[in-house]
Amino acid sequence: MTGDLRPRRLDPARLKPLQDWLAGALEARAVAITGAEILGGGAIGENWLIRAEVEGGARAGSHDWVLRTDAVARLDISHDRTHEFALIKAAHAAGVKVPEPVATCPDEALIGAPFMIVGRVAGTAQGRVLVRDAAVAANREALVHEIGRQLARIHSIRPPRDDLSFLPLPEEPPARAQITLLRRCLDSVSSPQPALEFILSWLEERVPESGGLVLCHTDFRTGNIMIDQGRLTGILDWEFCHWGDPHFDLAWFCARCW
């Protein structure tokens, strides 16, 4: 366990309701959760490693899964966990390396907020660790190609999609829609921001032609890409996805802050 004293949704001392619900969701005779441990990271979501023994059904056996729910304090602009689960399912079906989707529950009554359960992915996403990883250095070129391949698979998901109908379609070209969104955010700030106003005006005059409308991960960067022994094992955190221009993800990935 970590020393983090923030309030939590899941109570490891009260797991029976979760076990019973999970048995029904998996069409199993019984599910026993033998351990629940809060995971580090996740400023927006709350992530728990749960160890489960499943009796009967298609998933019979021992599993290490991750239960992901909203933190008590969350951002309104992020998708809820049921929507994030739908995004992960769509990506999984498209061949993207994501945690395996297991189950989702929209009922707040069970643990205090909607949640999803996905497979555990090996490795680390921490940039400060990866830049010193000898296996990453030795496999650098192949790793970059794989990152690009995974991003292309994400961008192969295009609207319209009934399973992703909660994602609004932009009412104007994607790049201009982003400028409109940023200007709306800037207008809500009480103090003048002339430098940012100038940047947005500069961008408005130079809006590029659209690269098409695709699913953008929107937070595709170091920190959300899991790597184990120099190989990409999973792409995490799908709570900010939107329909947009594929160049959005490329630009975000290349930002020097990552």
Image (tube, grey):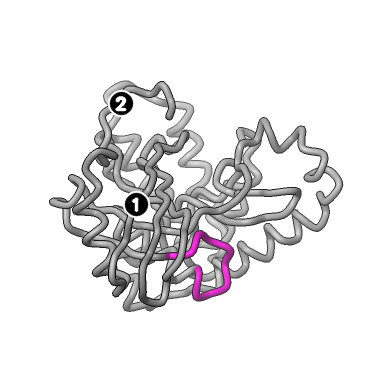
How far from the left and from the top, in percent, is residue 238? 44, 54
Nearer the observer: mark 1 or 2; the answer is 1
How far from the left and from the top, in percent, is residue 104? 30, 62
Tag 2 residue: 6
Where does the magenta region start and end? Answer: 92-101
> From the image, which quarter does the C terminus lie in?
top right
In-image side of 109 versus 174 (left or right): left
From the viewer's side, name the closer residue of 171 and 2. 2
> From the image, which quarter does the N terminus lie in?
top left
Q: Residues within 10 Å of mark 2 (few under 14, many from 20)?
A: few
Q: Secondary structure at mark 2?
A: loop
The image's mark for residue 25 is none
Residue 98 included in the magenta stretch of the image: yes
Residue 151 appears in which quarter of the rendering? bottom right
- Kindly identify the residue that appears in the image at 34 percent across and 52 percent down: 33
Q: Callout 2, which amino acid?
A: Arg
Tag 1 residue: 33
